[in-house]
Image (spheres, grey):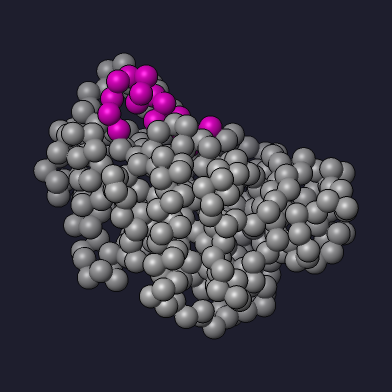
Amino acid sequence: MRIGLVYDLFEDYPWEAGDPADADAENEPPETIDVLVAAIRRLGHTPVRIGTAYDLLVELPDLRIDCGLSIAEGTRGRMREAYAATLFELAGIPYLGSDPLTLSLSLDKAWTKDLVAAAGVPTPPYRVYTGPEAINPEDLPGPFPLFVKPRYEGSSKGIVASSKVYTLEALQAQVARVTAAYRQEVIVEPFIEGGEFTVAVIGNAPPEPLPVLQRAVDAATGIGLHALEHRGIRPVAPLQPAPYVPLTDELETQLQALAVRVYEKLQCRDFARLDFRVDREGQPWFLEINPLPTFAPDGTFAIIAELMHRPYVDFLAEVLQRGLRRLKLA
């Protein structure tokens, strides 16, 4: 088969005046596309590099592919991750990954949390604010410290050390910063002190949770180091990791079960990555899900492959093969 790849490289980001420094943080380096190409070839298929969703739109009338795979994040708006999947559906081209509804809904942190809570998975309470003037001091989502982040972004965009706030004045300042810089509402929730964990899930009917990864957190703020060191944002002070929380077999099983429940509730397909915090009493809390995760050679899936003693290209080929089976193309 000919499998078309849709993606956004860092160099593809259409910068505009006033964009925050980390606006392109969700885009990919060329090495991510290279490893996907290698995985497709490992399965005996022909990869077709298309480029961005806008490139797909232009090429679609004359494009000859049997299946699509998009890791394109788009640029602005909460529908942006669904552009390529929508075009594939309009053209009648089968594609790997979740459908446009799941991709759009999961980018909205508030709507996602509502569905996750309905599924019985613990997630911190929240409030959505359009600006600092919308904050009601008598109706905060919980006690301080609170955490402020953009409502429709991923890859830790908008998160800095001061995103964790301890006072009403600091909360108002952070809400003002994020709404102005990212041109969207913010979501505010209690900050869960403790460890941070990532669970990747692959496959369908039933989905399979992979080994749980623990993420380092900053000793000073408790925020994940990956969030404070992400592309475009440099921490103002040196970061030191806090001691790791023990990942027991019981906790890993619990996190995996919760991840699968969320994956199925949101009707994800083929692959996703979920983030959790575990508080000091050992209670897991869902933070967010990404059904459009990075497959970068230094990302979550590559680390899991290393832990499983699998060559990354072989492991990634297996992930894609499961999706092809769902489509009855393998």
From the image, which quarter does the C terminus lie in?
top left
Task: Tell me where residue 41 appears, x and y as whole percent.
Answer: 16, 46
- Outermost residue toward the left in this view: 44
Q: Is residue 195 above or below residue 26?
A: below
At a point 31% along the width and 16% down the height, the residue shown is 61
Q: Main secondary structure of the magenta part?
A: helix
Q: Nearer the viewer, residue 233 or 155?
A: 155
Q: Is residue 287 above or below residue 43?
A: below
From the image, which quarter does the N terminus lie in?
top left
At a point 84% along the width and 64% down the height, the residue shown is 167
Give the side of residue 273 with respect to residue 127, left or right.
left
Give the side of residue 169 with respect to residue 23, left or right.
right
At a point 18% along the width and 34% down the height, the residue shown is 328
Q: Is residue 47 above or below residue 259?
A: above
Q: Nearer the viewer, residue 54 or 122?
A: 122
Which picture quadrant has residue 238? bottom right
At a point 23% along the width and 58% down the height, the residue shown is 315
State yes or no: residue 88 in magenta: yes
Give the side of residue 280 with respect to residue 267, left or right.
right
Task: Tell me where residue 44 appears, x and y as whole percent.
Answer: 11, 43
Q: Nearer the viewer, residue 212 or 221?
A: 212
Q: Nearer the viewer, residue 304 or 51?
A: 304
Whether residue 14 is visible, yes or no, is no
State yes or no: residue 60 in magenta: no
Task: Tell me where residue 182 appears, x and y as whole percent.
Answer: 68, 43
Task: Tell me where residue 284 appears, x and y as whole percent.
Answer: 54, 65
Which picture quadrant has residue 54? top left
Tell me which segment is drawn in magenta: 79-95
